[in-house]
Image (cartoon, grey):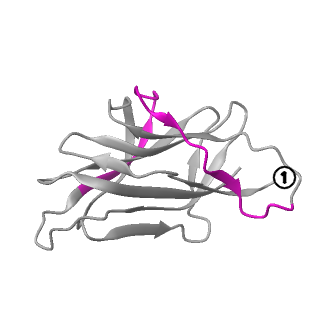
Amino acid sequence: MNVQLMVSTAADVSVGTGAVTVLQVIAATGVRVKILAWGIYFNGTNATGEPALVRLLRQTTAGSSGVAESEVRKVDDDIAYTITTTALRGIPTAPTTGDMLKTLRVHPQNGYEWTAPFGGEIMIGSGDRVGIEATAIGATLDKTRAFFHIEE
């Protein structure tokens, strides 16, 4: 059964000048997950601040000190289904990076969203991880939020 899920940060994540994985999705063993969309938003106060570096990465480890994310929800809550995907947020000690899927700069008073074109979804293999990593350039961004719209 294909069930769509929203995975989002339940609390603000602080992003400083060291890379932080704002949100990481972990596919369960034996389950492949499709990323249908993802995004990140900052709540900076400096209109002339330098854009933050944002990277979407395949990650081979969990890193350390991440918080288990509780905001993993079915889009249609009427479907009888047990969610197997898990997530972590605010991982300050960088997970081991595998493939870099996307890299971009995002203004600290703005955000970024990506939606997959039909047939162009990003796949997360069985037991694998994908994370949204951010690095502030200059001032710390204390109120960072991110999300994944996925299908398992």
Compared to 53, does 93 lie above or below?
above
Give the amino acid type for the residue marked by disc 1 in the picture: Met
In magenta stretch: residue 61: yes
User: Which residue does the numbered mark 1 point to in the structure image?
Assistant: 1
**Could you say which is closer to the camera, residue 23 or residue 129?**
23
Q: What is the x, y in percent for residue 95?
A: 38, 30
Q: Count residues near mark 1 (Cα–Cα under 10 Å), then give few for <14, some for 14-19, many for 20+.
A: few
* Relative side of 145 to 54, left or right: right
In magenta stretch: residue 17: no
**Mark 1 element type:** loop
* Relative side of 72 to 132, left or right: right
- Tell me what residue is drawn at x 65 percent, y 47 percent: 33
Q: Residue furthest bottom?
A: 47
Compared to 6, does 48 lie above or below?
below
- Tell me what residue is drawn at x 15 percent, y 74 percent: 47
- Tell me what residue is drawn at x 46 percent, y 67 percent: 114
Report which quarter residue 109 is drawn in: bottom left
Report which quarter residue 150 is drawn in: bottom right
Q: What is the x, y in percent for residue 136?
A: 20, 52
- Magenta segment range? 53-78
- Tell me what residue is drawn at x 86 percent, y 58 percent: 79
Q: What is the x, y in percent for residue 142?
A: 29, 53
Q: What is the x, y in percent for residue 119?
A: 61, 65
* Relative side of 46 to 26, left or right: left
